[in-house]
Amino acid sequence: MDGFGTRVREALAAQGTSMRAAARALHYDVSYLSRVLNGKQQPSPQLAQGLDELLKTGGDFAALLKKPEPEADDTTRARSAISHLLDHDNRYGGDQVASAAVQVWKTEQRKLDRNIDPDKGYLAAVSEVAEAAGWILFDANRKTEARQAFIESQMLARHAGDRPMQWFAMDLLAMQDVQDGRPGEALRIADSLLATPRLPRRIALIARVRRSRALAQTGDRARSLTEVERAKSALQDSITVRDPDWTWWVDEMEVVGHHAEVLISLGESAAAIPHLQRTNELVVPGGRGAFYYAVAELSAFAEVGAWRECETTIMRLVAILEVVTSARSQARLDATLRIIERDAPSWLVGIVRDIFRSLPIRKQRQPRTRHPGQGR
């Protein structure tokens, strides 16, 4: 489906529309759209229809999806299935599709186990499936399974000689270590990446972000802020032809968001607020990312007692919660709501209780006991 991405990029360029602007107009995560336009993910019929309407192409993109495709092999089918699940995760969160992602991953793993001498291309493909399944499981807060998938992805990538995918799996393990409060392990992974000869700059930038988050969790303010500032200053200059395809999601929104999380971990929520506000300006409205960063902003407001700002953010969250289910963000929201119920004035406590009692998603989970500063 590479021709689809080429055609869309040409149409966007002809009309002077950026990929980010198109993603915002269509209410898609820009990372998903980037994967589609770079041939890394299958476009959905809904995306094709939306692009036709946005670019006024008279149904050309939808027609491209209706053309018969050659019979796909097992690996192609698995990648296609995972791509649709990632699309769902980007728009609605991973909770509802995590089990399906596990099914796809385990099916490919069983096939691989029966193959005595698999070629490196197949090993690399199954590594990619495991990585994608791990991400969806991570978003669904299924921590043990997510870690298992990331470790499996790293091992398969190493055997396949796919260094970019191996680096990706290592980065995701460091990400999970930060969320789970294992800064020592996250630091070891980040340092291992940074010690790699001729490491692409974009991956070095991500490793510094993980390192800054881990250092903040240890209370090392000076070094954590130095690392995140180095990552921010390198954002524009880090883009090179050597960057792996998977680094498409590293942008200003991502790095500024991590800067905010560093400050929250250091107990400086007030300083984090402007960074979170900037991140919420950049995020695509209505999807998983919007849920994540709205909750992060709410947690910072609650920590500093900015109750009117909490009310505004809660009202924004209500619309998102009607369609997005991300267990990791929900766990952080639960912890933040407990802070509000404990510390906020009675008028806000009443609003919180009235709103969240009526939401089905609120009834599906028991609150978690995690510090709201442990984020992405």
Image: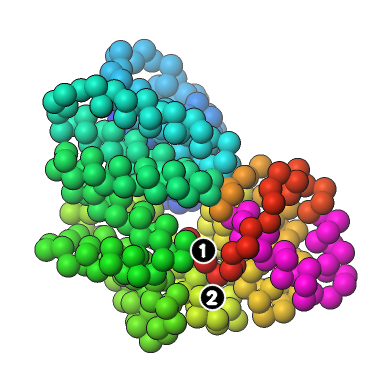
> Where's residue 86, x and y in %?
46, 38
On-image quarter of the N terminus: top left
> Where's residue 227, x and y in %?
33, 77
Label ID, residue 45: none
Q: Are marks 2 and 1 in contact (CB under 8 Å)?
A: yes
Residue at 22% x, 63% y: name it: 193
> Where's residue 68, x and y in %?
36, 12
Residues 289 and 183: in front is 183
Residue at 11% x, 63% y: name it: 197
Q: Is residue 41 visible?
A: yes
Q: Main secondary structure of the magenta part?
A: helix
Residue at 59% x, 49% y: name it: 327
Residue type highlighted by circle 2 = Ile
Relative placement, left or right, of 17 versus 274 is left
Label ID, residue 375: 1
Relative placement, left or right, of 306 versus 196 is right
- The stretch of residues the image draws in magenta is 329-355
Q: Is residue 368 magenta?
A: no
- In the picture as drawn, the residue positioned furthest to the bottom comes out as 222
Q: Which residue is mark 2?
A: 264
> Where's residue 67, x and y in %?
38, 15
Relative placement, left or right, of 327 versus 157 is right
Residue at 40% x, 22% y: name it: 64
Q: Earlier in the sequence, mark 2 or mark 1?
A: 2
